[in-house]
Image: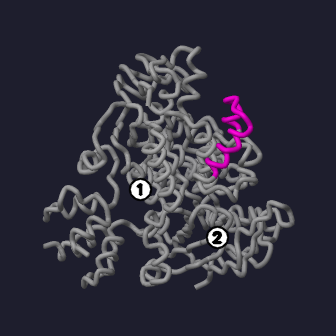
Amino acid sequence: MDGQGIELVNVTKIYKNAGTEKTALKDITLTIQPGEYVGLMGMNGSGKSTLARLCNGLIKPTRGKVYVDGMDTSCPENTTEIRRLVGMVFQNPDNQLICPVVEEEIAFGPENLGLSITEINSRIAWALQALGLENQRHHAPHLLSGGQKQKVALASVLAMLPDYLILDEPTSMLDPASRWELMEHLRALNTQKGMTIILSSHNPDDLIHANRLIVIDQGSIYLQGTPAEVYAQESELADIGLEPPGIYQLINLLEEEHNIADNVKSIAELVDKICPK
Amino acid sequence: MPKIIEIKELDYTYLPGSPYEHKALKNINLSLEQGDFLGIFGPNGSGKSTLAQQLNGLLCPNNGTVTVCNINTADKKLRQELWKKVSLVFQYPEQQIFQITVYNEVAYGPRNLGISETEVQARVYNALQEVGLIPENTEHLTPMSLSGGMKRRVAIAGMLALKPEILILDEPMAGLDPLGRKLILDIIKNRQDKNETTVMISHDLKEIITVADKIAILDRGTLVFCGEVNQLLENTNILAHYRFELPDYLQVVYALADRELDVNTNISSMKEAAMEISKFIV
C-alpha cells in the first residue's frame, strides 16, 4: 500500500441543532494505517458513526483535521478523490439503494468512476460472486429481504474497489451464516487485496478478525487493543453497556476458578483444551 | 386453550405470474395461544417478514387461511377491526417517526381510535413507561434528537399505546447495542408477565432462545420447526442444522458431549454451563 492512511488530529465534532449543541467526538487523535483492520465498538450514540463519517469527508470536523492519504477532508477540492479512495456502507441499506435492478445498483459506482464497460462488467460479476448474490442479479433491490439488501449495498461499494472500506454496522440485518461469510470476505479483502477495513458493529463476534479494536464512549476513546486484550476486560466493557462475545464471557467466567490458557479464544480451542481429540 | 393465531396451509407468492415471481411461504401451519411469546427465526430471505405481514392482513394468503383474534385476515370488511388488535412494528421503525414531539408521536395512533384526550394521555404515559422512558422527561423532546435506541423505543411505544392484543416486532434489536437490546427484551418480558401475546422476528437464534416460549424456524419459505424451546434442544435433526447459531456456551457443551464426555446438556444459562464445564477442567 502506498497510501498514508487516515489520520485524525485533535478532532472534535459538535452537532448544532435548533440552539442545542451536542458534542459527538471530543479531541480524538488517531491514525489508521494503510492495510489495517480496525473494529469500532461503542453504544448507540457513543460517536462511532460520527467517526466513520468523518473518515470519508461526509461530515467535517468542528475542530481539528482529518487527513486521508494526506488530503485534508475539509478542503472541497479533495472531496472527489477522497470519496474514490474511501468506500462507505451504511447501517440501513434502504438509505443507499437507488436503482431498480441489483446489477444496475452495483454498476452505479463504477460507471461514475468512468470505467470501461468491460471493467464494469467484470467488477459486477466479482462483487455478485463475492457476496453470493448471483441469483439476485436481475432482481429489484427493494423486493429483497433486509439482509439481501444489505449485501447489495456492500456489493455496490466493493465494486468501486476502494482503498479504505468503512462499514457502519453492516451486519445488523444479516443472519449468522451471512454474517460469517461477510466477515470472511472482509478478512480476504484485507489480507489479499490489502484493503483497509474500518468496521463498526454491536456484535462483538464480528470484530474478532480486527488487528485493533477501538472502544468509543461518549465521544472519547475508552479502550484500545487487540480483540483478545479488549475482550478480557469484561467489567470495563460492562461499565459502558458493552459485552465481549459469548465465548469470551464463558472463558472469563471459567477463569474465576480455573486457569484457561491465554491462547484459548474460540469455541473449538476451548473444547480442545478441556477434552483434546 | 383457544388459539389467538391459527394459520392453516398458508401459501404466499410475490408477483405471481410475473418474471419476478417468488414463492415466499409454502404450506405453513402454525398456531399460537394467548400470552405466548413466539420467536420466528430463519436466515435472510426465509420468509419471516412475509409471515409477519400475514398476521395483520398487510398481505393475504394465496392459499390457506390465517385467523388472528378470530378474524379471517382475508376479510377486508374486518381489516380495521384487525388493525386495532394486531400491531406490527416494522424493521427500523424509527424511520417512520414524523411528529415533532415524543408525546405527539406516541399519541398519533390512539388519537385515530377516536378516544378522549384524557384516555390518550393515559395511554401515552403508560406506553412510554413500558418502554423504559420517563414520560415527564421525554414527552416534550423532538424524536430526532434522541439516540437510535431511544427512537426505536418511542416507535414501539406508539404501537403499545394502541393496546394491541398481539404485538409483532420485526427484527426489533437490529442495530442496537447490548443495553438497547436488553431494554427491548424487557418490554417483551413485561408482556409475557401480563399474559399478552408477542411475536418477534429475529435472524439470531441466540437472541430469542433464552426468552421465547415457542420458536418457529423458517427455511426458504417452509416451516421446518415449530415448538417449545426445550423441544428444539431435544430435536437432534434440527439441532444438527442450526447448532452453530446456538449461544456459544451451549455449543461448547454440545461439542464436549460429542467427545463422549458425560456432560449434562440440559443447560439454560451461561452460569449453569460454566458450572457444568468446570467439572471437566483438570
Q: Is residue A113 magenta?
A: yes
Q: Amino acid at mark 2?
A: Arg
Q: Residue at x 74, y 65 (%)?
A: B57
**Quarter holding residue B75:** bottom right
Give me the chain letter of mark 1: B
Residue bearing mark 2: B220
Residue bearing mark 1: B182
**Quarter holding residue A266:** bottom left
Q: Is residue A250 above or below residue A76?
A: below
Which quadrant does the N terminus of chain A fall into? top left
Secondary structure category for the residue under label 2:
loop
**Residue B96 image offset from top left, x and y in percent:** 65, 45
Gap in angstroms between the C-alphas marked 2 and 1: 29 Å
Which of the labelled discs sits on residue A190, or is there none? none
- Residue B234 lies left or right of residue B77; in this view the side is left
Q: Residue at x 26, y 66 (%)?
A: A270
Q: Residue at x 28, y 84 (%)?
A: B260
Judged by depth in the image, the label closer to the viewer, 2 or 1, is 2
Q: Residues within 10 Å of mark 2 (few under 14, many from 20)?
A: some
